[in-house]
Structure formats: C-alpha cells, structure tokens
Amino acid sequence: MAIVKRADRQHYMNTGSAAQPVWTLIGEGFTSFTESKNAVSYQRRYIHEITKRTDVTGYAPVIDYEFEVYSGNPAIEKIRQITDHELVGEDARVEILCVDLFDETETSGVYRAVRRSYSVIPDECGEGTDALVYTGTMKAVGDLVTGTFVRSTGTFTA
C-alpha cells in the first residue's frame, strides 16, 4: 500500500460548451481547491431508546477555491469572467470533473471520474501583494454524474 498524493486527484473544468466540452486541468495558479460534502442528516430518538438515530438524507457540496491569476489559463479566465462581470444564474455555472489517477479502470489510461455542475460564488478579487488573487466557493447544482475519463484525449464518458 502507498499513500495517495493530493496531485493524484485532478480536477478539470469544462471551458468549452455542453455540446463540445473541453476539459481544462485546474492546476497552475490554483493554491486551494477543497471540497466539503456538507452532508444533510435527519435525527430522531424514539421513546424506547437512549441514543439518537441519524440518517444521511442528502448533500450540499461546496468547493472552496483560491487562485493566482495566470494569463492564458482558460479555467482561471472563466471564473474571472463570472466574477468581474458579476454574472448570475446559468451564466455563473461551471462543470467540474474530478478524476482520481489512483483509480484506473481495467483499461490503461482510463480513470473513474465524476462530473457535477456548480454555481460560482465569488468572494474576493484583488487580494495579494505580489500576485492578483481571487477566492470564492462553488456550490453544487444537481447530482453527480459518474463515468470515466481518458487523459490522453480529454474525453469524459458518462
């Protein structure tokens, strides 16, 4: 057994369109990209019991991000457009793909992956003294779509 490095979980953003996705690696410039599952639970205690019962009834995932602005990075440009132009609704949504490089399928170079849409909720822009820094969160819109990702072609298949 070997420990899994953070770099073995890669995230991609669709910087193309729904019809013609272009999966851009969320990497250089990003100093933080952390998902919180925020499980929603239902608790109750029946009259004959001492201990409460808890069931998970849903999730409200959030990704906290921070990046230094690098020119020419399509993922950074997409978030900057949403932030700088104060886009709302569907215009403020992105598709994120999470690929675990330690979870390869039976086919070499093909990895298990999950895709989900998120609303970008900007926080701060212009932080930092040496580099222009943006921060914010992405909140889930809808359920996960499971599938596979081929790194060599940048293709996700649900």
Image: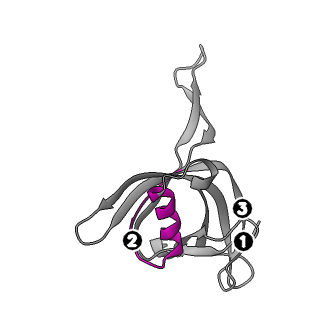
Q: Position of residue 33 (x, y in %)?
A: 45, 62
Say which label, 2 or 1, has the lower sequence index.
2
Residue displayed at 38% across by 61% down: 134
Asked if labels 3 and 2 touch by Cβ distance under 8 angstroms, the answer is no
Cα distance between the residues tagged 2 and 1: 30 Å
* Mark number, residue 146: 3
Q: Which residue occupies the foreground of this view, 8 or 79?
A: 79
Magenta span of residues: 62-84
Relative to 48, does residue 150 appear above or below in the rendering? Answer: below
Horizontal side of 75 relative to 123 (left or right) equals right
Q: Horizontal and vertical percent for residue 21?
A: 70, 71
Judge the density around disc 3: few (<14), some (14-19), many (≥20) Cα neighbours within 10 Å. Answer: some
**Image quadrant in which you'd find residue 129:** bottom left
Q: How is the image coloured?
A: one colour
Q: CA distance from mark 1 to mark 3?
A: 7 Å
Task: State the separation of the CA atoms marked 2 and 3.
Answer: 30 Å
Residue depicted at 73% across the width and 72% down the height: 20
What residue is at 68 percent from the left and 84 percent from the top? 109
> Would you identify the image quadrant in which residue 107 lies?
bottom right
At label 1, the amino acid type is: Thr
User: Residue 30, image x and y in percent?
Assistant: 42, 69
- Identify the residue position indicated by label 2 in the image: 69
**Residue 5 visible in the snapshot:** no
Taking the view exactly as shown, the residue that stands out farthest to the top is 47
* Residue picked out by circle 1: 148
